Image (cartoon, helix red, strand yellow):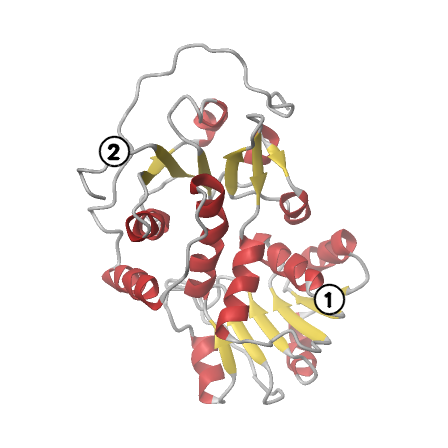
Amino acid sequence: MSDERKIEKAACIIAWPAGHSRSPLIHNYWAQKYNLPVEYRREAVSPENLTQFVTQLHDRGYTGANVTVPHKEKVMTLSEPDERARAVGAANCLWYDAEGTLRSTNTDVAGFLGNLDAATPGWDRGLESAVVLGAGGGARAVVYALLQRDVRRVFVVNRTPERAQSLNKKFGSRVIAAGWDETTGLLGGAGLLVNTTTLGMVGQPPLSINLRCQASLVVADLVYAPLITPLLALAKDKGLRTADGLGMLLHQAVLGFERWFGVKPEVTPELRALVEADLLAGAPKPAVPEAKPKPAPKPRKERKNPRRNN
């Protein structure tokens, strides 16, 4: 950020720890690109301090925030979650509405769909069947997104059957629980495969899968470290269309920036190259602004927030 620019609005990432986040790099790139007097910072907030921090967000100078592990579920009780956040069971974006109510949503849904639309146009045209690996928070966002695009059947594959069955109970009969040993058979008739597990991530076991599938299968992986996961490498070798986790990371940031600062930013090749270089370097850029310590805010008149005390 330019030192000559007066900062009028700020947002932050709330995490514990916070040093690994690439969100400041993304949002501050957009702030510079659109010449806005705004800044995005990191805030390392421990679980025991989360309630106090979020309820004092405005007093600390923030117009909104992103929220990541381990706070995505707890923050829903401190804000007014929308339909997406309630459906997914987690929120990762906070903002104040015109009445001063702190609201929350889950931008992973829009990020997943936006990335697929950009990387593999037409992926959902006539899509009858999708296979989702994993049944955690990422899977819930993906399943919800696929149902919004009218995918007729979403098979959730998980090594623990009970977790996969919980998504069937949550989202209904279009979501079908399946065992890991059924994956190959399901892929034969599927139009989309999505990995939401950590398998294939740096430091995690590899994802072992037999891609016996149609040539039209689209393969998406939510993992972005490494940039090209073993699953994506296998898919590319077979000539399949792919969408990577970095694309989802970039696209999920769009909604928050627009909510906080009033400009809908673009995910450009330049931004992608910047974040790719940062990931390959193995650490966030030291030039990314850090939040300066602030004294506790003075007591003030309560803002309207009906869920604050839940």
Extreme right residue here? 173
The amino acid on which the numbered mark 2 sits, given as a three-letter code, is Lys
The answer to whether 4 is drawn above or below residue 182 in the figure is above
Left or right, 54 with reference to 289: right
For the N terminus, the image quarter is top left
Give the residue at mark 2: 6
Q: Which is closer to the viewer, label 2 or label 1?
A: 2
Seen at 36% across and 67% down, the residue is 226
Kind of element beneath mark 2: loop
Left or right, 143 with reference to 75: right
User: Where's residue 33, x and y in %?
Assistant: 30, 53
Extreme left residue here? 3
Q: CA distance from mark 2 to mark 1?
A: 46 Å
Residue 148 in which image quadrant? bottom right
Q: Dot 1 surroundings within 10 Å: few (below 14), some, or many (20 or more)? A: some
Q: Nearer the viewer, residue 218 or 34?
A: 34
The answer to whether residue 198 is seen in the rendering is: yes
Residue 280 in which image quadrant? bottom left
Q: Nearer the viewer, residue 238 or 146?
A: 146
The answer to whether residue 196 is seen in the rendering is: no
Give the residue at mark 1: 150
